[in-house]
Image (cartoon, rainbow, N blue to C red):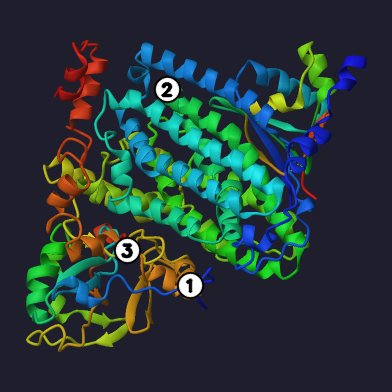
Amino acid sequence: MSVNAISEYHAEPKDRVENFNGMQLLYVYWPKHLMFCAPFALLVAPDMTFGAFVDELLKPAVAGHPDSEKADFLNAQWLLNDEAFTPDPAATLIDNGIDHKSMLTVTTPGLEGIQGSAS
Amino acid sequence: MSQKVFIAFQDNDNARYLVDAVMQDNPEAEVQYQPAMIRIEAEKRLVINRETMEETLGREWDVQEMLIDVISIGGNVDEDDDHFILQWN
Amino acid sequence: MAIKNKKLNLKDKYQYLTRDMAWEPTYQKKEDIYPDERFEGIKITDWSQWEDPFRLTMDAYWKYQAEKEKKLYAIFDAFAQNNGHQNISDARYVNSLKLFLSGVSPLEYAAFQGYARVGRQFSGAGARVACQMQAIDELRHSQTQQHAMSHYNKHFNGLHDAAHQHDRIWFLSVPKSFFDDARSAGPFEFLTAISFSFEYVLTNLLFVPFMSGAAYNGDMATVTFGFSAQSDEARHMTLGLEVIKFILEQHEDNVPIIQRWIDKWFWRGFRLLSLVGMMMDYMLPNKVMSWAEAWEVYYEQNGGALFKDLERYGIRPPKYQDVANAAKNHVSHQAWSTFYQYSQATNFHTWMPEEEEMAWLSEKYPETFDKYYRARFEHWDKEHKEGRRFYNNTLPQLCQVCQIPVIFTEKDDPTVFSHRQIKHEGERYHFCSDGCCDIFKNEPEKYIQAWLPVHQIYQGNCGGADVATVVEKYYHINPGVDNMEYHGSPDHQRWLDIKGLKPLKSNSEKKSAA
């Protein structure tokens, strides 16, 4: 469906990748760790390697959680936009198929949040 | 399923008379006292009669005066010079 | 009795002073005078069927409103003269007013603008008069709320720039975009959104139990403006119900359009009210009722009766009502968790509930609080006491429609976010729920333009590259004064001084103390 309007209705998406000055958005969700109230929204360079993303962005983002020290993200289970995904740590994000506004979900088996409450 | 109409008044001096009048005309209604407010609910129908209010107050009373003290209502409204009715069909 | 007969009865008076004041145009076509009345597809065959059950005319309106205002301002004066702010239950309570002033009062103003606009767009005189009165009411609410809270602004931080903040602060885009969505719709959708879905179905949850809570926390000024505003709401609610019945009775083609709007605006309103749930469960030190209890009375019971009444028109309860009903046991905890961890970017303080408050939450939420939220809160409390007060140092993913971070969980599994994602014309979009995702799919062009605060910060449109700069320069929040943890804040210190009955010397000292 489309907007019912008094005249022709045309709109541009506000969050096209061109508007991010060479960067792109990446969302990351760590299930069973809902102490972080929502998936993270991160600003990333598309040519950053996946390994660098984990070390430089993801690890600092989750550092406040007691499970973070035990989390082995490079050997965890990943989903990219809800589909199974095996990241290549040496390749860039974009070469890993991670495009603008993609969502990564990383599950760390055995880690169930604070006192197992999924928090 | 139960279908309750309700009306809530500010808990002030005017409301005391309103509650008295409402309870006279709707003996099956339930009055709930909460901080600063009084909530009255009844199954399907609740009526406020001008005549009862005037007797309770001892003076003439315009049904629209109620607008000053009411906080909220639930139900279809039917108002004229003599009564204010809330009901579900 | 002869004298009494000279007085017009209510019905005649309403007819003379409302409908009979209108006229049929002769040298212009009606369609040209009211050009926005048809494009939404709503068919009105006979405007004279419009009912105003209160039959309020302008003369009576001014008379009763003047009386309300006199009572209200007498109480504001008494409150200020008696230093009423010193008699509230606890200064933590004031933080709910900061949220109210920046999140709700600007909506009253937006409602004023909305009703002033749509009041011009209906060709029926009854509808125009009702919208005119409501526009004036809404303006009055915005003003009286600001006047009531100006007293608090003399004594507490964070109330200094609400209008500026409403247009900028990340979470205030939630209420702002809600009303912008309604105001940019056609006149009939606006009425369905605001008069019916919001005013009739949902605002009781904001104005009745929360205001009763204000009274219970010693805030005479707020309960009075709240109930004074709500006395107008009784009229607005009646209008909201009449509007829906009128449109549905006019033509059967209107039914599916109205149903879609009810589905949309119930969901949007429900999401918006997450903020109120948190205010009730976490920001009122003395509790009246839990959010779940309020939801049961004011939505499940009253809304249930309402939608049963509307069945005869072919209207069913809103889609995803079941999801909303199940969420009553979660949303307040999820919202408070969010504000707690992002309190570096809020215009109010947050805190962890005290032990007896946790016990109250366990009692009111026996199925959910201990199982899903207590461990998180106790962990944060412990961290804070050990000098590591938790703040989330990244930004959250926002829902493209309601603009709330994607914080809500699945109806059947509260340990999983109810995140949804779709691709539209090559762009990815993310949502907090099926409800918001459906709204997007119905009108994608409207929501692809959403001004999402997180994305705007990352695009460099909010005055700085880091959160601290955005908060201070763009939001006008004084870091460490207006925001972050309540305990140890200047507000907290000031409250301890007040309770120690140490008189403060001057107005300027009031705010610079501590």
Give percent across and percent down for residue C111. Answer: 50, 46
Q: Which residue is mark 1?
A: C443
Nearer to us: label 3 or label 1? 1
Neighbor class of circle 2 (other Cα within 10 Å; few <14, some 14-19, many 20+) is: some
Whichever of callouts 2 and 3 sits on the residue coming sooner in the sequence is: 2
- Looking at the rendered structure, whether the residues under marks 3 and 1 are on a common chain is answered as yes
- Residue sitting at x 14%, y 69%: A58
SS of the residue at dot 1?
A: loop
Rendered residue at 15%/63% (across/down): A61
Side of C101 where C195 appears, left or right = right
Same chain for the residues under marks 2 and 3 in the image: yes
Type of amino acid at the residue the image marks with label 1: Glu
Q: Residue at x 9, y 87 (%)?
A: A91
Of all chains, the one bearing label 1 is: C
Residue C29, above or below C12 = below
- Under mark 3, the amino acid is Leu
Label 2 in the same subunit as label 1: yes
Mark 2, residue position: C218
Amino acid type assigned to the residue bearing label 2 in the image: Gly
The single residue placed furthest to the front in the displayed view is: C27
